[in-house]
Image (spheres, rainbow, N blue to C red):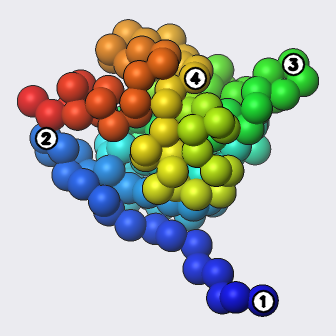
C-alpha cells in the first residue's frame, strides 16, 4: 500500500485571508480562526462539530451525495447556528477526502450565512471565494 499523507496546506491568500486546504476537517486548528477552509470531509454533523471548534470565515465540505435526510450536508445548518458560513461542493465535482478537489469543486449547497455572503449554487467555489474575499 502506498504512503498516504493527509494534506494541510495554505494554497492561496485572497484579500487578507488564507485559503487552507485540509483533506480532513479533523485537522482544523484554533489558529485557523477567521480563515477560509476547504476540506475533503463530508458535510455531516460530525464534521460540523470539528469545524465549529474555530470561528472560521467560511468552510466548504464535500456533499457526499447529500444522502438520506440530507445527512451529507447536515453540518451546514449546525454551523449556521454558530455563526459560521458554510457550504458544500458536489461529489460529482470533487473526490471525498481530497481538500484540493473541494477547492476546485462546484458549489451544491449553502447555509444562509454563506448565501448572505454572496456565494451561489452552481458556481466554482474558487470563483466565489475570489469575488467575495478578493477585495
Where residue 36 sits, quadrant-wise, is: top left
Camera-nearest label, 3 or 1: 1
CA separation, marks 2 and 3?
Answer: 37 Å
- Disc 4 marks which residue? 108
Camera-nearest label, 2 or 4: 4
- Disc 2 marks which residue? 15
Answer above or below: position of 11 versus 121: below
Percent position of residue 135, x then y: 9, 30
Q: Disc 3, disc 1: CB below 8 Å?
A: no
| Residue at figure coordinates x 66%, y 38% from the top left | 91
Secondary structure under badge 4? strand
Local packing at callout 4 (Cα closer than 10 Å; few below 14, some 14-19, many 20+) is many
CA separation, marks 2 and 4?
Answer: 24 Å
Relative side of 13 to 108, left or right: left
CA separation, marks 3 and 1?
Answer: 35 Å
Q: Earlier in the sequence, mark 4 or mark 3?
A: 3
CA separation, marks 4 and 3?
Answer: 16 Å
Q: Disc 1, disc 4: CB below 8 Å?
A: no
Residue most toward the right?
68
Camera-nearest label, 2 or 1: 1
| Residue at figure coordinates x 33%, y 17% from the top left | 117
Q: Earlier in the sequence, mark 2 or mark 4?
A: 2
Q: Earlier in the sequence, mark 2 or mark 3?
A: 2
- Disc 1 marks which residue? 1
Where residue 30 sits, quadrant-wise, is: bottom left
Relative side of 43 to 105, left or right: right
Percent position of residue 76, x then y: 62, 26
CA separation, marks 1 and 4?
Answer: 33 Å
Instruction: Tally the marks.
Output: 4
Amino acid at each position: 500500500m502506498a504512503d498516504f499523507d493527509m494534506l494541510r496546506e495554505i494554497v492561496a491568500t485572497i484579500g487578507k485571508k488564507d485559503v487552507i486546504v485540509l483533506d480532513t476537517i479533523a485537522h482544523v486548528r484554533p489558529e485557523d480562526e477567521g480563515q477560509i477552509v476547504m476540506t475533503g470531509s463530508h458535510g455531516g454533523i460530525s464534521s460540523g462539530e470539528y469545524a465549529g471548534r474555530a470561528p472560521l470565515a467560511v468552510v466548504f465540505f464535500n456533499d457526499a451525495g447529500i444522502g438520506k435526510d440530507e445527512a451529507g450536508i447536515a453540518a451546514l445548518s449546525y454551523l449556521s447556528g454558530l455563526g459560521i458560513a458554510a457550504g458544500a461542493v458536489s461529489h460529482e465535482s470533487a473526490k471525498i477526502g481530497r481538500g484540493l478537489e473541494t477547492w476546485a469543486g462546484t458549489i451544491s449547497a449553502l447555509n444562509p450565512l454563506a448565501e448572505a455572503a454572496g456565494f451561489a449554487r452552481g458556481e466554482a467555489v474558487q470563483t466565489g471565494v475570489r469575488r467575495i474575499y478578493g477585495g
